[in-house]
Image (cartoon, helix red, strand yellow):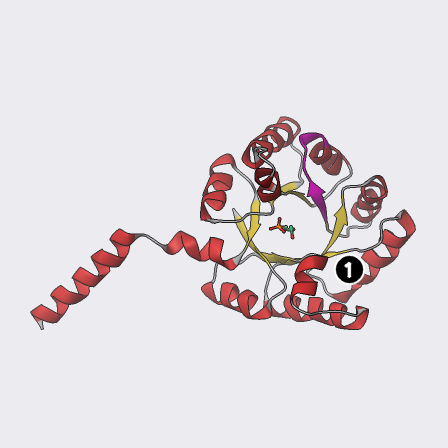
């Protein structure tokens, strides 16, 4: 399972990269705004800075919602850096654009996916990644993990190459549950990754080992 971090915060990206378990980064316009990155020039430079900080794929989202606009923006984003994946919303023109990018060998991440039908369409269009937002489904009392399960079944039935990128992951249990179901990738906050480290028996066991070592010396 690949681990992506879902942030535009370079400090957190560097911390995750330093852990040695990071496979990529996802961003979105809200995450960029949260870091105070505004204006086209600054946004594009920030994507390049993120790419230079990590070794894997970096999703950069288009703002346009019409076919021509998505193509123009997506091609410009893809030219920025070899690690850029063009993030395209699950809308009709988005699907057409994903087909175009896929035929040109440009990687895509189909975002804002909330149903198995949408995920099927994204795979048919040749998306590299499909992003079902599990946390946002959980927020409205819908079962986000069940959606991952459904998509896994459908993709396996037909050997689709599209990778299931479980998005809107909010905590460590989401990461574990997605791993059990067989999501190819999860993207979440640094806290969800670091949370995997924690167990009280590890802490108490280590404290005892160190104490006993001191006694023996
Ligand atoms: C996915 O790529 C999105 O950036 C993200 O996972 C959305 O998460 P949120 O629902 O926590 O905003």
Q: Left of 204 or right of it: where is 196?
A: right
For the point 68% across and 70% down, the residue is 36
Occupied quadrant, residue 45: bottom right
Q: Is 115 one of the magenta-colored residues? A: yes
User: Residue 179, percent across and down?
Assistant: 49, 41
Q: Quadrant of the C terminus?
A: bottom left
- The residue lying toward the viewer, choosing from 97 and 61, is 61
In the depicted view, which residue is nearer to us: 171 or 182?
A: 171
Residue placed furthest toward the right: 68
Judge the density around disc 1: few (<14), some (14-19), many (≥20) Cα neighbours within 10 Å. some
Q: Residue at x 69, y 35 (%)?
A: 119
Determine the residue positioned at 63% across, 43% down. 133
Identify the element where label 1 is drawn. Answer: helix
Q: Is 35 on the left or on the right of 67, as rendered?
A: left
Query: Is residue 84 in the magenta section?
Result: no
What residue span does the magenta drawing correspond to? 109-117
**Residue 51 in which image quadrant:** bottom right
Q: Is residue 59 visible?
A: no
- Residue most toward the left? 216
Disc 1 target residue: 78
- 149 horizontally vs 35: left or right: left
């Amino acid at each position: 399972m690949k681990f992506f971090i879902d942030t535009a915060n370079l400090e957190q990206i560097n911390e995750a990269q330093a852990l040695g378990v990071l496979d990529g980064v996802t961003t979105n316009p809200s995450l960029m705004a949260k870091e105070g990155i505004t204006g086209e020039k600054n946004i594009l430079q920030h994507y390049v800075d993120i790419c230079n900080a990590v070794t894997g794929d970096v999703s950069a989202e288009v703002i346009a919602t019409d076919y021509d606009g998505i193509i123009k923006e997506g091609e410009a984003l893809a030219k920025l850096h070899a690690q850029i994946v063009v993030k395209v919303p699950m809308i009709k023109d988005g699907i057409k654009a994903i087909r175009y990018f896929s035929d040109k060998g440009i990687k895509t991440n189909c975002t804002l996916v909330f149903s198995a039908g949408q995920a099927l369409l994204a795979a048919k269009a040749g998306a590299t990644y499909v992003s079902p937002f599990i946390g946002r489904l959980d927020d409205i009392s819908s079962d986000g993990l069940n959606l991952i399960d459904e998509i896994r079944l459908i993709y396996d039935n037909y050997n689709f190459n599209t990778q299931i990128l479980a998005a809107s992951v909010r905590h460590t249990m989401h990461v574990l549950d997605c791993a059990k179901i067989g999501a190819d990738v999860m993207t979440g906050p640094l806290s969800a990754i670091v949370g995997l480290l924690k167990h009280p028996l590890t802490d108490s066991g280590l404290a005892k080992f160190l104490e006993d070592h001191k006694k023996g010396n």
